[in-house]
Amino acid sequence: MIELRPFSSLGSANHGWLDAKHHFSFASYHDPKRMNWGSLRVWNDDIIAPKSGFPAHPHRDMEIITYVREGAITHKDNLGNEGRTVAGDVQVMSAGTGIAHSEYNQEDVAARIFQIWIEPSRTGEKPSWGAKPFPKGERSGQFVVLASGFANDDDALPIRTDARVVGATLKAGETAEYSLGAARRGYLVPATGAVKIDGQRINARDGAAITDVEILRVTALEDSEIVLVDAA
């Protein structure tokens, strides 16, 4: 089953420096039908103005994955970690027992990101942060695991939850398959382009909530960049 969540139906908040769209209930946006999707709790589609961002603030007991679609984001935290994550790359912060961080767009152009929060399957561990470049060529025409809580995904950034974040870039007409499993929940968002799943069109920045699908087949209607969360 595929439930389409059009971009126009998402929650929103515009703070001037931050134009945010919420796939799930977040902050002042509340929809009891969109509280979570399994362990997936937050999927925010954020546009951050140049020379602005989130000042230092705390988190705990959450896996926070930032997928940079355009521009770059600079992270700093109270553990001494600092890094700049550019378009197409991913950073992961395991908040664990507690971490405080800031996230700024220090560039001269707007940063466009997906920020994804997944509930951890284990708690009480020290916080951590990491980032990794994922050249788009490596996922051309296929899904590549970007972050994972499964031990056999050696090349992915580790997260402390029974979930994966995967990405793909497809040319118009290409089809990619992902073994989801009927007992799992998928949530797919095209960062760019448009795709078709089981005859249903999903446009850029729409959400598709997926259940009861053993093998997920995604066909690009246009050149597309796709992000998918596979959650328990």
Image: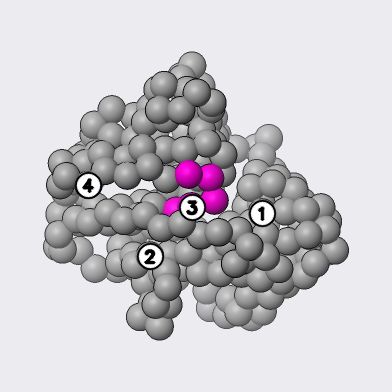
> Could you tell me which quadrant the N terminus lies in?
bottom right
Residue of label 2: 157
- Residue 81 got which mark? 4
Instruction: Give the alpha-carbon distance from disc 2 to disc 3, as whole Å.
Output: 11 Å
> Looking at the image, which residue sits at the far top?
16
Give the magenta-colored segment's residue range.
86-90
The relative height of residue 125 versus residue 56 in the rendered view (above or below) is below
Residue depicted at x 56% and y 39%: 70
Q: Secondary structure at mark 2?
A: strand
Quick one: label 4 or label 2, which is nearer the N terminus? 4
Camera-side residue of 185 and 171: 171
Q: Nearer the viewer, mark 1 or mark 3?
A: 3
Quick one: label 2 or label 3, which is nearer the N terminus? 3
- Residue 89 got which mark? 3
Residue of label 1: 225
Residue 152 on the magenta segment: no
Q: Are marks 4 and 2 in contact (CB under 8 Å)?
A: no
Q: Residues within 10 Å of mark 3 (few under 14, many from 20)?
A: many
Q: Nearer the viewer, mark 4 or mark 2?
A: 4
| Picture coordinates of residue 72, whole percent (x, y) | 47, 38
